[in-house]
Image (cartoon, rainbow, N blue to C red):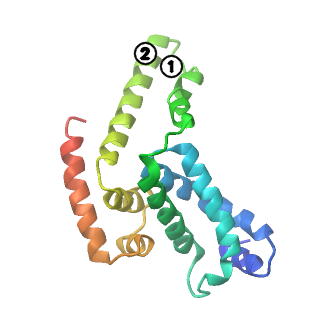
Amino acid sequence: MDELAAVEQLKQGDIAGLEILVQLHQIRALRAVFLITQDYALAEDIVQSSFVRAFERIHQLDPDRPFGPWFLRSVVNDALKASARGARLFSLDRLAGTFDGWRSGTVLDGRLDHAIEQSVEAAETRAEIRAALAKLTVQQRTAVVARYYLQLNEAETAEIMGCARGTVKWYLHHARRQLKTLLHPL
């Protein structure tokens, strides 16, 4: 079953179509929300709620437009709202997530020290990138996530963000300039 058939199934009140849409869009949506909010547990909650809301509001989807951009716009908007509240909230799951790499027990070529060193370096690089993204405005961060992580073009990014294409270009220009400065040593 393809996206169009799944949407039609939802419009007929059959929730089974939602499974296909989840398979098609969950990973991209989760990645985008995580990169915007920088909180995995919150990202999971937002994406799950967005799928339920999509089911409830599927009749608002223009039949001439694809589900993906319509859904991602909703998800990104929810992520932006959560980011605005984010400074007031703290997730214990975020702290627990920092230890996930150590639980896996990865050993390369039997040399634990080498594996630990590589793991620490990779974690530090990821942390520096996340920290640099966090220093961007929410709009700049959203534009970067949509354009480079979701691999949407400027028109799709503008649609998701609810702004003009030129505004997206402006956000991306300033975000790239700031990221270049922040990540220069990497």
Which quadrant of the rendered structure holds the N terminus? bottom right
Residue name at image x 49 percent, y 40 percent: 90
Residue 17, image x and y in percent? Answer: 75, 70
For the residue marked with disc 1, what is the amino acid?
Leu
- How busy is the neighbourhood of tag 2: few (under 14 within 10 Å), some, or many (20 plus)? few
Location of residue 182 with respect to 11 vertically, above or below: above
Residue receiving disc 1: 108
Tag 2–tag 1 contact (CB < 8 Å): yes
Distance Cα–Cα, label 2 vs label 1: 7 Å
Residue name at image x 30 percent, y 56 percent: 137
In which quarter of the view is residue 124 placed?
top left
- Label annotation for residue 114: 2
For the residue marked with disc 2, what is the amino acid?
His
In which quarter of the view is residue 146 placed?
bottom left
Compared across the picture, whether 37 is left or right of 129 comes to right
Location of residue 78 with respect to 106 vertically, above or below: below
Compared across the picture, whether 16 is left or right of 140 comes to right
Check disc 1 and report its element: helix, strand or loop: loop
Residue 184, image x and y in percent? Answer: 20, 40
Which quadrant of the rendered structure holds the C terminus? top left
Which mark is first along the chain, 1 or 2? 1
- How busy is the neighbourhood of tag 1: few (under 14 within 10 Å), some, or many (20 plus)? few
Residue 185, image x and y in percent? Answer: 20, 35
Residue 6, image x and y in percent? Answer: 72, 74
Q: In front here: 68 or 134?
A: 134
Residue name at image x 26 percent, y 69 percent: 169
Check disc 2 and report its element: helix, strand or loop: helix
Location of residue 161 with respect to 36 vertically, above or below: below
